[in-house]
Structure formats: C-alpha cells, structure tokens
Image (tube, rainbow, N blue to C red):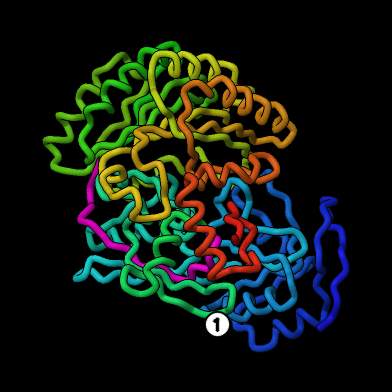
Amino acid sequence: MTTHPVTSAPNGSLVAPALEAADIGELRADFRGSLLLPGDPGYEERRRVWNGAIDRHPGVIARCAGVVDVIRTVNFARERGLRLAVRGGGHNIAGNALCDGGVVIDLSGMRSIRVDPARRTVRVEGGATWGELDRETHAFGLATTGGVVSTTGVGGLTLGGGIGWLARSYGLASDNLVSVDVVTADGELRIASATEDPELFWGLRGGGGNFGVATSLEYRLHPVREVIGGLLIHPYEAARDLLRFYLTFTASAPPELTCFAVLGSSPDGQPVAILAACYHGPAAEGERLLRPLRTFGTPLVDGIGSMPYPALQSMLDQAYPPGLFHYWKSSFLAALDDDAIDAMVAQAAERPTPQCHLVIEQLGGEVSRLDADATAFAHRHRPYNLLILGTSADGADMQACTGWARQCWDAMQPSFAEGVYVNYIGTEGDEGSNRVREAYGAAKYERLARLKTRYDPTNLFRVNQNIQPT
C-alpha cells in the first residue's frame, strides 16, 4: 500500500491523503459502474450539487452500479484512510455529498423502485429522488411521507428524519421505514429492521449518514391519490395579520391538514406572504376545513384546488432549482406568538435578495404521537420549525445573504426552543459540533455515539452531521 501525501484542493483547502494512479487502477478493476477523476468528461457536472455555494473537488467520484460497487468503494476508502462522502440526491444544505480530495460514493446510478401494492410497501434504491418514488407509487394510489420538493433525494431526507406534507397524517419519512439495506464501515451489507438489528434500525431513523451507506430503503405506503392544496399569496402588507391568523388556524387543524407559512417573494420578485396547504381526506371535509384559509383577507392568488399528490409534492420545485447559493439557519420554535411574528415580519422586510425567505413548518399530529424514544429523531413535541434561507442567484450576494440570515437568527433567539432538525444544519465550521448534539438531546446523542462506536469506530463516515464514536 502506498503512502499518500497531504495535497491542496483547487479551492485552497488541504486534503489528505491523496489518491494515486495505482490506487485508482485497483478500484477500477471489476468496478461495474464508472469512476470519474478530475479532468474526465462528466467530472465537473457530478461534483456540483444542489447548493451552488458548495465547491469541492473529490479525488474520485465512484458512480456505483450496485451494492457490490458500494462495498468495494467503502473497503477501498477505509483501507487507505481516505476521506469518504456519500451522495444520494445531493440536496443537503451543508454539501455533505462531496469532499475535497477523497472518495465520493455516488448512488445516482442506483434508482430502481419496486412497489408491492398488496403489502402496501415500496423498495427504493438510495440514489432515487422523491419525485421518482411518487411517480411509481401514485400509479397504485399510494404514497408515503417525502419532503416538500420532489428533487430531494430519498435516502438523505429519510435518514435525517424526513419532514414532509404527509407527516402530520402518517409520521415522518423515517417513521415509515420497514427496513434498510446498509453497507457499514467494515464493508458488510446489513439488513436493519424492527426484527433484524433493531438498534441499528433505531439509529438509521434520524441519525443521518453516520452508520453506513443506505443502498435501499423499504417504506410503508398509505392510500393517497388526490389531495386538496396549493398556495395562497397575499400582499406583504398583510403579513402580520396573516401570521396571526395562521397561528390560530393551525392550532386547531386536524392531522390530515398541513399548512406552512412563507415570508418571501412572488415569481416577479415582489415581497409577499404565502400560505401553503395540503389536505388529505374526504373532499367535502377538506373544502370545509380550508374555507377559513381561503376567505381570510384578500389574496393576490388563490391556488388552492384538488390535484394529484405528486403535483402538490412538486409545486415548489421552481422556487428551489439547482445552482442557487444557499446559507440556512434553523431551529424549532418554543412559541409562535406576537413577539415572534413581529420579529419575523421585521426581519423579512430587510431581505437582501428576492430569493431570501422565511418558512414556518407545521409539525404535530402523527409526528408528536409516536413514542419519543421510538427513533433517533428528537423534539417530536415541537409544533413548529423555523427555517431561515439566505439565498441568492449570484454568489456575489452571499455575504449579504449570510449576514441577513445570521441577523434574523439572532433576532429570533427569544422564540427558539432547544434543538434543530438535523437535515437543516449547515457546515460544522459555521454551526459548531455542539449543534449536532442539540439535534438529538443528551440521552439520544450518547446512545447514537455508542452505536457509532459499534459500527464505525474509526469514524469513516464523518462527512455528515457527525456523531463522534465514544
């Protein structure tokens, strides 16, 4: 085995150790997928992720064609002490799908989906997106909780918990897992479920990518075909009153109804306040429940209507295209009261770009009814989450967007609860390692650390929101 010197990535960051031609040749032997090196056709495309602010240069991108490729690549990186990242959909805000100088396991070639309508389950490989999964399950009138943007990767969202439109009805994406096929740091393929390695299964439902590469995931499905939902867009001048109405409206909403609030911009760049709703249930009841939402104030646009679930799941895609520059801050809310509303309205009025915005996500329902210790996901009892998005179409604006997001974060501190949704944490250099502990709370973090020690004692899987081995 060769010794690998410390080198410098094109963006100036130090990476160690480096890859050499002999190593790549050894990995390439009997590799069914494709290996992309710097300078190869397709390398530049595959080193880009959804967040345009992420600029990293892997030593090799291993586009795996199957589980054996994944196993070989995990062993290859472990034996050489190489930095290793895992890419599914590449939607993670912190850019954890990439690393400088090391190895990226790219699952984008592994996207098969098999629906079992009789058992109401679906088995999906780790490189698929929610839009692809929804397309297959919708053909059978079935669905499970995904995110709120169809281009999000299935695996990454689920392993971190999985907030989505159907969570209040059916629980988080991770709550609907039946089993996970995962390649652990020793190169073994394991099946984790309630009956097979249940402790690992517990950790995979919320613990992020700390325990291995999820090559396929099996979910429970639910009867979902048509939903009633869409966007209500109001002038920004109505934002304060609209959020006060939102608080009252959501406080008594049944689990079948989910409503998010947004302070942002219309497609033409004008400041607006938006309510985004999804109701799943009998149509007549949905019309009755949504009537107060539609009759409050004078909306500029009433886009509420009956639609196929995949249409609702993709209705925000145009607002989150790949390549925008993102800096996020997030926390659960202890209270959504007048003080919190006043602070949000004031801060949103100072957004430096039209793409910057605030999102209030409604939780509760089935999310809070599941036993708190059932999975690694924590803070189930919080009714709302706040997401602050410092976003721009031009990287030159990112300093202003970052400053605004931090300013907003500081202004909202009196309204925040302890804890954060792990999928919304930024880079460790910005957020600090303690933020990961806050995502789980002390007891769950220690349990996850013991699990990490068991399955990844050398912390091979560390390009993530990392849980340190004990």
Where disc 1 sits, the SS reads: helix
Q: Quadrant of the C terminus?
A: bottom right
Seen at 46% across and 57% down, the residue is 159
Left or right, 97 with respect to 315, comes to right
Q: How many marks?
A: 1
The secondary structure that dominates the magenta segment is strand
Q: Please tell me whether residue 210 belongs to the stretch shown in magenta.
A: yes
* Residue depicted at 17% across the width and 32% down the height: 287
Q: Which residue is mark 1?
A: 68
Residue 258, image quadrant: top left
* In the foreground, 67 or 138: 67
Question: Residue 92 in the image: x percent, y percent?
Answer: 56, 50
Amino acid at pointer 1: Val
Would you say 121 lies left or right of 360 here? left
Residue 55, compared with residue 453, is above or below; it is: above
Q: Quadrant of residue 193?
A: bottom left
Q: Is residue 123 visible?
A: no
Residue at 31% of width from left, 55% of height from top?
144
Q: Is residue 210 above or below residue 168?
A: below
Rendering coords of residue 54 (x, y %): 69, 48
Q: Quadrant of residue 179?
A: bottom left
- Whether residue 95 is in magenta: the answer is no
Image quarter of the N terminus: bottom right
Where is residue 330 shown, x and y percent of the image?
52, 35
Report if residue 161 is visible in the image.
yes
Classify 25 as above or below 240.
below
Magenta residues, as a range?
A: 209-227
Mark 1 is surrounded, within 10 Å at the Cα level, by few (under 14), some (14 to 19) or many (20 or more) other residues, namely: some
- The residue drawn where x is 34% and y is 26% is 232
Q: Position of residue 315 (x, y in %)?
A: 40, 41
Side (left or right) of 65 relative to 433: left
